[in-house]
Amino acid sequence: MKLILKEDVPHLGKPGAIVNVKPGYGRNYLIPQGLAAIATSRNIKMMEHQLKVIERQIDAAKAASEEIQARLAEMSVTVSKPAGENERLFGSVTTRDIQAALEEEGVTVDRRRVIIPEPIKALGVYTVQIKLHGGTTADLKVWVVKQ
């Protein structure tokens, strides 16, 4: 039985692949679970179109992430926090603080994509990483100043 995979199936193939499977496996598992469709000429054309659309979306996301990466490389943000003696902060700088500082600069980044290697608990200059599309990261300088 020839099927077109709609999703990644372990040990079988990636989305868009045309595979031969035993009829029972196709009828009883792959098709009901929505993992595959019967390989008719219409379904093949539809899957090719969907793959082209997905590729365009991936290319657009990569271009946007490269633009953001270049912008973040040139940028630095300032976070002001209350500090006590010996330039120690009351608390620490969090990903939400960095996200808010980036939004003030006009860059929208999800706070879960901000990676702080170790807790920031003192005044100074720190480098944090921001995960972008496709596994790329951008370094951002964060200045922590007294409020």
Image: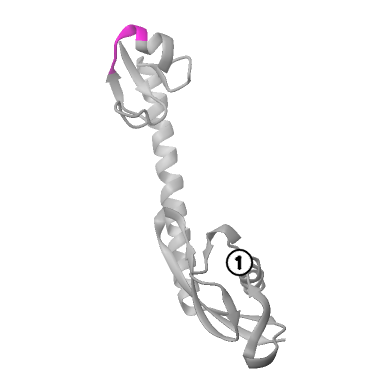
In this figure, what is the number of numbered marks? 1
| Structural crowding at the residue carrying mark 1, measured as other residues with C-alpha within 10 Å and reported as few (<14), some (14–19) or many (≥20) | some
In the displayed structure image, the side of residue 96 where residue 134 appears, left or right: left
In the displayed structure image, the side of residue 144 where residue 46 appears, left or right: left
Above or below residue 32? Residue 126 is: below
Q: Position of residue 143 (x, y in %)?
A: 58, 83
Magenta span of residues:
20-24
Q: Position of residue 86 (x, y in %)?
A: 63, 92
Disc 1 designates what residue? Answer: 95
Q: What residue lies at 53% left-to-right and 60% top-to-bottom?
A: 113
Q: Is residue 11 visible?
A: yes
User: Which quadrant of the figure has residue 3?
Assistant: top left
Above or below residue 108? Residue 53 is: above
User: Which quadrant of the figure has residue 17?
Assistant: top left
Q: What residue lies at 43% left-to-right and 23% top-to-bottom?
A: 35
- Considering every residue shown, the one lying at the far top of the view is 24
Depth order, front residue of 60/132: 132
Q: Which image quarter holds the N terminus?
A: top left
Q: Is residue 110 visible?
A: no
Q: Is residue 22 magenta?
A: yes
Amino acid type of the residue that numbered disc 1 sits on in the rendered structure: Thr
Q: Position of residue 51 (x, y in %)?
A: 39, 35
In the displayed structure image, the side of residue 90 where residue 119 appears, left or right: left
Q: What residue lies at 45% left-to-right and 52% top-to-bottom?
A: 60
